Image (spheres, rainbow, N blue to C red):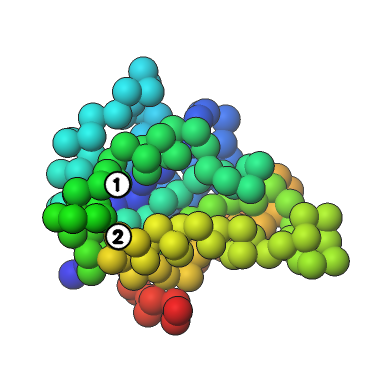
Amino acid sequence: MTRTLVVLAHPDLATSRVNAALADGVRDLPDVTVHDLYAAHPDLRIDVPGEQRLLDAHDRVVLQFPFYWYSVPPLLKKWLDEVFERGWAYGPGGAALRGKRLQLATAVGGREELYRPEGLNRFAVRDLLRPFDATAHLTGMRYEEPFIVHGASSLADEELEREVRRYRELLLDAPVPVAA
């Protein structure tokens, strides 16, 4: 069975409707660990060895976060910068993540049509997430198709329930990586 670490990064999960529902919807799954970065590191000081041990214990890493300003929340960026360090995650002697799978799960406030060449944001969210594909490549991880919830700010309850079911199925099914 695949052991999955969901690295949840929401700066105010108590006010989140979509990310909170997604996380709550998978907490009971076997071999899934939901790790809330903001709860684990309220002082924003990352326990790098502890985080690396968590990564060592899992086969797949899912970064779950709200998508805003075309990026990730600040603590997730800091986590990546510090935890995926040279000599551990990449570079000479850095093979700790090699062979693991990397996947993103993000909630986007805007509708999908806003994220097209002719749309307001000019690029598809998948294109804006390409730096994570590069991160996976650098660290020897297999990058998988991102799980994207568009229109998060206006989802009806039944749509949110459908997205939670889709997320659960995704974490249970262990999909095939995206072709390079």
Instruction: For the C terminus, give its image quadrant.
Output: bottom left
Circles 1, 2 touching at the beta carbon (< 8 Å): yes
| Residue at x 37%, y 79% (from the top left corner) | 176
Judge from the rendering whether residue 144 lies leftward or rightward of residue 126; answer left or right.
Answer: left
Judge from the rendering whether residue 107 lies leftward or rightward of residue 166; answer left or right.
Answer: right
Circle 2 residue: 139
Question: What secondary structure is found at the residue carrying circle 2?
Answer: helix
Q: Position of residue 73 (x, y in %)?
A: 52, 37
Circle 1 residue: 84
| Residue at x 18%, y 36% (from the top left corner) | 50
Tally the marks.
2
Residue farthest to the top, as pictured? 43
Q: Type of residue at label 2? A: Thr
Give the vertical position of 34 relative to 39 (above or below): below
- Relative depth, front residue between 39 and 97: 97
Q: Type of residue at label 1? A: Phe
Q: Position of residue 49 (x, y in %)?
A: 17, 36
Query: Counting other residues with Cα less than 10 Å from the Cα at mark 1, is it few (<14), some (14-19), or many (20 or more)?
Result: many
Question: What secondary structure is found at the residue carrying circle 1?
Answer: loop
Give the vertical position of 109 relative to 103 (above or below): above
- Relative depth, front residue between 135 and 172: 135
